[in-house]
Image (cartoon, grey):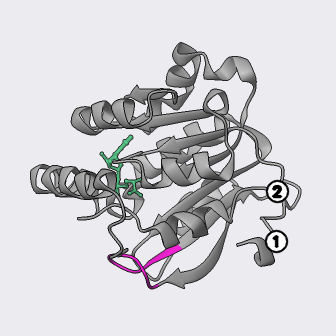
Amino acid sequence: MDIDLKTRDEVASRWIFFRQWLRNPLSMAAISPSSRQLAKRMIAELPVDCRRVIEFGGGTGAITKALIDHGITPENLLIVELNADLYRHLRSRFPRVPVVHGSAADIERLARESGFDRGGPADAVVSGLGLLSMARADQRAILDAAFSVMTAEGRFIQFTYGPVSPVPIEVLSELGLIATRSRLTWWNLPPATVWVFSRARSRAVPAVPSRLR
Ligand SMILES: C[S@@+](CC[C@H](N)C(=O)[O-])C[C@H]1O[C@@H](n2cnc3c(N)ncnc32)[C@H](O)[C@@H]1O
């Protein structure tokens, strides 16, 4: 966890996140927002020419902020958040960024209704969802929906707290996906690993070169 509490924004975010975790620990899947280090590791997995991004489970905006700082513009960004309080928090913290209230499994409809789809498919989906604790049917529905709104080379970038892939190999092969894993980020509560899922037949899309991470 990032112990450098630089802004009041961050302190407020942690408190809001913790309160939501007390109410719904399974859906929140963590007691604290992602650290800056973990957010950076997620960003490092974006395709090199990445322009359009959808974020699943924006929470209090730890990864949203990193996406904006990376240069993803508001018209090329769509945040999906299921929790009504966190949805409102995201809307007030990032007034220029489109945030929708709903489930990631409904991303096709949400992208259409929000007008995001008019700008073309996404290059990446960045996910903070607790996939590890979800039923396989829910994992399958969310991944299937995510790949339907991405380009053929689209990447699904996910962090997880366990040592293994948050999605079992059977689900990945049913959907024709392959998985790659990056190093463990110790500086997060709890330590986390970033996984990237992509279509098995897609061209290899290089991530941001490691010297830029
Ligand atoms: C582990 S938190 C990650 C929050 C934030 N991205 C971060 O890294 O700090 C998971 C978030 O996913 C949201 N969530 C859970 N299920 C969801 C779903 N089906 N669709 C959209 N958001 C969901 C929760 O409300 C919570 O904000």
User: Of the numbered discs in the image, which one, if any, rests on residue 37?
Assistant: none
Vertical side of 33 occupied by 150: above or below: above
Residue 188 within the segment the image draws in magenta: yes
Crowding near pointer 1: few (<14 within 10 Å), some, many (20+)?
A: few
Q: Quick one: 7 or 28, which is closer to the camera?
A: 7
Q: Amino acid at mark 1?
A: Pro
Q: Quick one: 142 or 125, which is closer to the camera?
A: 125
The percent position of residue 19, horizontal first and vertical second, equals 13, 52
SS of the residue at dot 2? loop
Name, please, the residue furthest toward the left: 23
Quadrant (top left, top right, bottom left, bottom right) of the C terminus: bottom right
Q: Amino acid at mark 2?
A: Val
Q: Earlier in the sequence, mark 1 or mark 2?
A: 2
> Quadrant of residue 68 in the image?
top right
> Quadrant of residue 180 in the image?
bottom right
Vertical side of 17 occupied by 164: above or below: below
Q: Residue at x 52, y 30 (%)?
A: 97
Q: Quick one: 67 or 27, which is closer to the camera?
A: 67
Q: Are marks 1 and 2 in contact (CB under 8 Å)?
A: yes
Vertical side of 139 occupied by 36: above or below: below
Instruction: Give the magenta-colored segment's residue range.
Output: 186-193
**Residue 167 visible in the shown view:** no
Q: Main secondary structure of the magenta part?
A: loop
User: Of the numbered discs in the image, which one, if any, rests on residue 209?
Assistant: 1
Residue at label 2?
Answer: 48
Residue 100 within the segment the image draws in magenta: no
**Residue 211 visible in the shown view:** yes
Q: Residue at x 58, y 17 (%)?
A: 112
Q: Residue at x 55, y 70 (%)?
A: 194
The percent position of residue 192, horizontal first and vertical second, equals 44, 76
Q: Residue at x 55, y 33 (%)?
A: 78
